[in-house]
Amino acid sequence: MKVSVNKRNPNSKGLQQLRLVYYYGVVEGEDGKKRAKRDYEPLELYLYENPKTQAERQHNKEMLRQAEAARSARLVESHSNKFQLEDRVKLASSFYDYYDKLTASKESGSSSNYSIWISAGKHLRSYHGRAELTFEEIDKKFLEGFRKYLLEEPLTKSQSKLAKNTASSYFNKVRAALNEAFREGIIRDNPVQRVKSVKAENTQRTYLTLDEVRAMTKAECRYDVLKRAFLFSCTTGLRWSDIQKLTWKE
């Protein structure tokens, strides 16, 4: 849209009213002819058609200055409304779709990290309980509810609550997705910045001694392949999920 200042024909007193002209481009009429689409906004500003004194010339100069200020203000309002519309469109878009695309981008990386992204998405859907979730729906209250849900409601296969570190990992994936959306300009306000993260606990890992590993080589196991995979993991440091992907070529 373009905005310009236009002078109307002078009245009986020789004064010309100023108005703003809004130009929206060319449209085709019912007769098939193309015409410029315009709107007009009269301003309570008048010029002397033929200024004769210094005061009248100064008056005209001031009226034109005010008209130009009005034109600039309307352009700012127009751009602001455009950005507001773009923001509303972005906020109404699907967070699930965005999250799933981010998740897919992690597939080529660590398998354990990729699995956490997938699981976090499943828990988010379980918490929300609806087929769709927009960015607009995700506010401080929603995220605090999701945080509480992870700490209290989900059950593992053994019917126990999620470990706190697991809940922390899941919440952090959703946090990471919102942070990325904020960096991309999809959201201008990031609600996750006002929500406490799930603090991970320091865990102490228990390691087998070399003698204990040697003893395991003599232990009986119903599934020999699992025993061999376990011993292979002990000697290489590879996770079970990584061992599963190994081929003879590797």
Image (cartoon, rainbow, N blue to C red):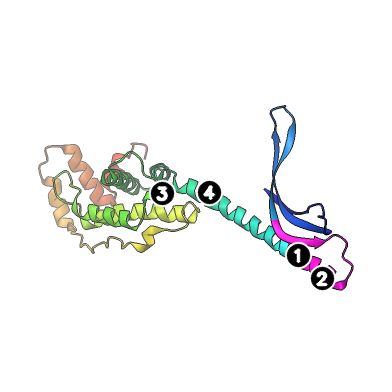
Task: Check if residue 61 falls in the magenta segment.
Answer: yes
CA gap, disc 3 and disc 1: 46 Å
Upstream in the sequence, badge 3 or badge 1?
1
CA gap, disc 4 and disc 2: 41 Å
Residue 226 location (% of width, % of height)? 19, 40
On residue 135, the disc is 3
Residue mark closest to the camera, 1 vs 4: 1
Callout 1, which amino acid? Met
Callout 4, which amino acid? Leu
Upstream in the sequence, badge 2 or badge 1?
2
As rendered, which of 29 and 154 lies closer to the eye? Answer: 29
Residue 43 location (% of width, % of height)? 70, 57
The magenta-colored residue range is: 43-63
Please determine whether, in this image, residue 226 is positioned above or below residue 30: below
Residue 201 location (% of width, % of height)? 23, 63
CA gap, disc 4 and disc 3: 15 Å
User: Label 4 crowding class (10 Å Cα cut-off): few <14, some 14-19, many 20+?
Assistant: few
On residue 58, the disc is 2
Instruction: Give the secondary structure at mark 1.
Output: helix
On residue 85, the disc is 4
On residue 63, the disc is 1
Residue drawn at the location 32% of the way across and 39% of the way down: 245
Instruction: Give the secondary structure at mark 4.
Output: helix
Residue 173 location (% of width, % of height)? 35, 52
Upstream in the sequence, badge 1 or badge 4?
1
Furthest-front residue in this view: 12
As rendered, which of 79 and 229 lies closer to the eye? Answer: 79
